[in-house]
Amino acid sequence: MKKLYSILCLAFLWAASSCDDKAEMNYVKKNDLVGKWDIIETGVMNSQGGLDYYPYQNSSCGTDVDNFEFNEDLTFSQNDYSDSTGSCQKGSLPGTYIQENHSLTLTQVIEGVTKVTNVTITTLDATHLQGTFDQGGQLFFIKLERE
């Protein structure tokens, strides 16, 4: 029995050491941002240093809610629904994004001016996306849900 165990161990070591050290591993990291994310809450720091979240106020366009839609090709659209004309209108601002770890950089060109928003991702899972960003010297918080 001891001989069989020794032979199996040697066979395993031989098989493990005979692998090509230069074999390429092509892993593709899943892009968890891809999809449509509805804005559900926004938040600001209060005077006591706490965080106050408020339900996001969408227009009265029925089931159409403001959202971000991230694509596999690293483009996105920021979609805003409005009913100011009596009928629901969708406004869409396209852009590009880069995500590295907990940092998300959104770049948009609005009326010829490039706007870059740096978002720190605090939560990203299958259904929830939360982040913080600075806008005009004030720190904002945002919660989104995958549609």
Image (cartoon, grey):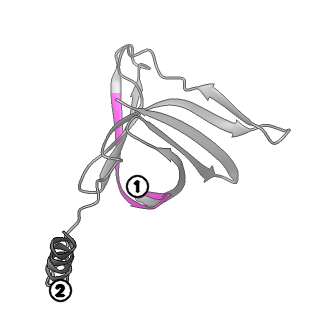
> Is residue 34 located in the magenta-colored stretch of the structure?
no
How crowded pointer 1 is (Cα within 10 Å; few <14, some 14-19, many 20+) is rated as many
Quick one: SS at disc 1? strand
Q: Which mark is residue 29?
A: none
Which residue does the numbered mark 2 point to in the structure image?
A: 22
Horizontal and vertical percent position of residue 33: 36, 47
Please identify the quarter of the rendering in which residue 19 is found: bottom left
Quick one: SS at disc 2? loop
Image: 90 above or below 61? below
Please identify the quarter of the rendering in which residue 128 is found: top left
Residue type for callout 2: Lys
Q: Nearer the viewer, residue 35 or 10?
A: 10
Q: Main secondary structure of the magenta part?
A: strand
Please give the name of the residue rendered at 20% of the width and 77% of the height, measured from the top-left corner. 6
Counting residues from the N terminus, which is met first, the one under dot 2 or under dot 1? 2
How crowded pointer 2 is (Cα within 10 Å; few <14, some 14-19, many 20+) is rated as few
| Residue 11 appears left or right of 135 | left
Please give the name of the residue rendered at 20% of the width and 71% of the height, measured from the top-left corner. 5
Image: 112 above or below 122? below
Q: Please give the range of residues in magenta.
A: 90-106
Horizontal and vertical percent position of residue 54: 63, 26
Q: CA distance from mark 2 to mark 1?
A: 41 Å
Residue type for callout 1: Gln
Q: Nearer the viewer, residue 2 or 56?
A: 2
Horizontal and vertical percent position of residue 92: 34, 39
Outermost front residue = 1
Q: Which mark is residue 108?
A: 1
Quarter of the rendering occupied by the C terminus: top left
Q: Nearer the viewer, residue 43 or 146?
A: 146
> Is residue 97 located in the magenta-colored stretch of the structure?
yes
